[in-house]
Structures are given as C-alpha cells and as structure tokens.
Image (cartoon, rainbow, N blue to C red):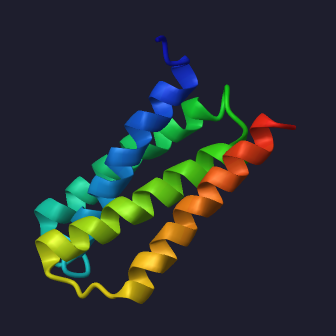
Amino acid sequence: MVIPESWVYLLIAIPFGVLGTISMKLSHGLKKWKPSVSLLIFYLISFIALTLAIQGIDISIVYAVWSGVGTVLVAIIGVLLFEESISIRKVISLMLVVLGVLGIHLANAFH
C-alpha cells in the first residue's frame, strides 16, 4: 500500500510536534537551553511538514489529526514519563478527542 505524500508529511509532523511539546516541558519555562533549542527545532520541522501536508489534504483534516493524535500521545507520555495523574475523566475526554478527529475525517471522506 502506498501512502500519499501529503499523509507522509503529516505522519512526520505529528511526532515532531509531540517532541516539541515534551521539550517545552523539559525546558522549565525556557530556563534550560538545550530543551529550549530542541523545542524550536522540533516545532520548526513539524510546521514545515504541516505546511507540506496541507498541499494535498484539507487544512481542517491536517490540523485535526495533528492536534488530536498529538494530544493523545502527549497525554500518554505525560503519564508514563512525567508521572502525571490519570483518571477515568481524562481517559474519556481523550477518547472524545479521538472520536472528534475520526468524525472530521469521516465527514470529509463521505462529502
């Protein structure tokens, strides 16, 4: 199966956006220089890939998938690496994010 080029760019943008967000946390309010520089580099790569992704995918789909998948990944990483709390309310809310992303994508697919 061949993945269209725009989707490859989106798949590149997601993990780099997540890495940018993790770097943001690790920078302690931009007080630590290495994570602060990493934050800029990771987000730059992510935004370049997003810019290329919207060449072939509707911007509403690109942003919904990027932010939705990124939100879920950051939440999981927050629990696993940063020992953030998890609750049934958080899990349900994250599932609603995923359903929203799927809903936007499916609405576009059947349009």
The residue at 67%/32% (across/down) is: 57
Rendering coords of residue 44 (x, y %):
39, 46
Query: Is 60 on the left or on the right of 40, as rendered?
Result: right
The residue at 53%/40% (across/down) is: 50
Q: Quadrant of the C terminus?
A: top right
Q: Nearer the viewer, residue 29 or 58?
A: 58
The residue at 62%/51% (across/down) is: 102
Query: Is 100 on the left or on the right of 14, as rendered?
Result: right
Rendering coords of residue 4 (x, y %):
55, 18
In the image, is residue 84 above or below residue 68?
A: below
Furthest residue to the top?
2
Query: Is 19 on the left or on the right of 88, as rendered?
Result: left
The residue at 38%/53% (across/down) is: 17
Rendering coords of residue 104 (x, y %):
71, 52
In the image, is residue 50 above or below residue 20?
A: above
Q: Nearer the viewer, residue 46 or 72?
A: 72
**Number of numbered discs visible in the structure rendering:** 0
- The quadrant holding residue 70 is bottom left
Furthest residue to the right?
111
Rendering coords of residue 3 (x, y %):
50, 18
Q: Nearer the viewer, residue 81 or 86?
A: 86
- The quadrant holding residue 72 is bottom left
